Amino acid sequence: MTAVPWERFPYSYSELNLRTREGEPIRTPVKPYHHGVIIGSLIFGFGWALTGACPGPLYAQIGSGFLVTVATLSAAILGTWSYATYKSIYQTNLVVTLNT
């Protein structure tokens, strides 16, 4: 239940009209929507649920002797590699779709 209040924090933060030390307003950037965010989130969530391992401490788990975590680390590396490989293809298709 802590994710919901933290998700709201950047929006309430920007509503306070806070400024930096130089006096510039603090703004929350607006990013364009694309389907890759939903698809990637689902894959990430399913992977987390199936392995039962948080992606953050993978190296610590391996160092502690939980060698089954090597499979999780391998999948994380494969996912990162596939994103880097296919990113330009997805962005090109997204631009074509939005312009038509």
Image: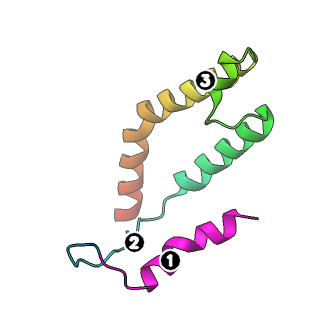
Q: Which residues are magenta?
A: 1-19
Q: Considering only vertical position in the picture, is 31 above or below 70?
A: below
Which residue shows up at 41% across the image and 49% down it?
93
Residue type at tag 1: Tyr
Q: Disc 3 to disc 2, how far (Cα)?
A: 33 Å
Residue type at tag 2: Thr
Query: What residue did someone put label 2 on?
Result: 28
Which residue shows up at 40% across the image and 71% down it?
28
Taking the image as shown, residue 91 lies to the left or right of residue 72, namely left
Query: What residue did someone put label 1 on?
Result: 11
Residue type at tag 3: Tyr
| Mark 1 touches mark 2? (CB < 8 Å) | yes
The main secondary structure of the magenta stretch is helix
What is the secondary structure assignment of the residue under circle 2? loop
Residue 18: where, in percent of width, then height? 36, 81
Q: Magenta includes 10?
A: yes
- Residue 100 appears in the figure: no
| Other-residue count near label 3 (Cα within 10 Å), few / some / many at <14 / 14–19 / ≥20 | few
User: What is the quadrant of the N terminus in the image?
Assistant: bottom right
| Mark 3 touches mark 1? (CB < 8 Å) | no
What is the secondary structure assignment of the residue under circle 1? helix
Query: What residue did someone put label 3 on?
Result: 59
| Other-residue count near label 1 (Cα within 10 Å), few / some / many at <14 / 14–19 / ≥20 | few
Residue furthest to the bottom in view is: 16
- Residue 28 appears in the figure: yes
Give the quarter of the image for residue 98. bottom left
User: What is the quadrant of the C terminus in the image?
Assistant: bottom left
Q: Nearer the viewer, mark 3 or mark 1?
A: 3
Taking the image as shown, residue 54 lies to the left or right of residue 87, namely right
What is the secondary structure assignment of the residue under circle 3? helix
Looking at marks 1 and 2 on the same chain, the residue that comes earlier in the sequence is marked by: 1
Looking at marks 3 and 1 on the same chain, the residue that comes earlier in the sequence is marked by: 1
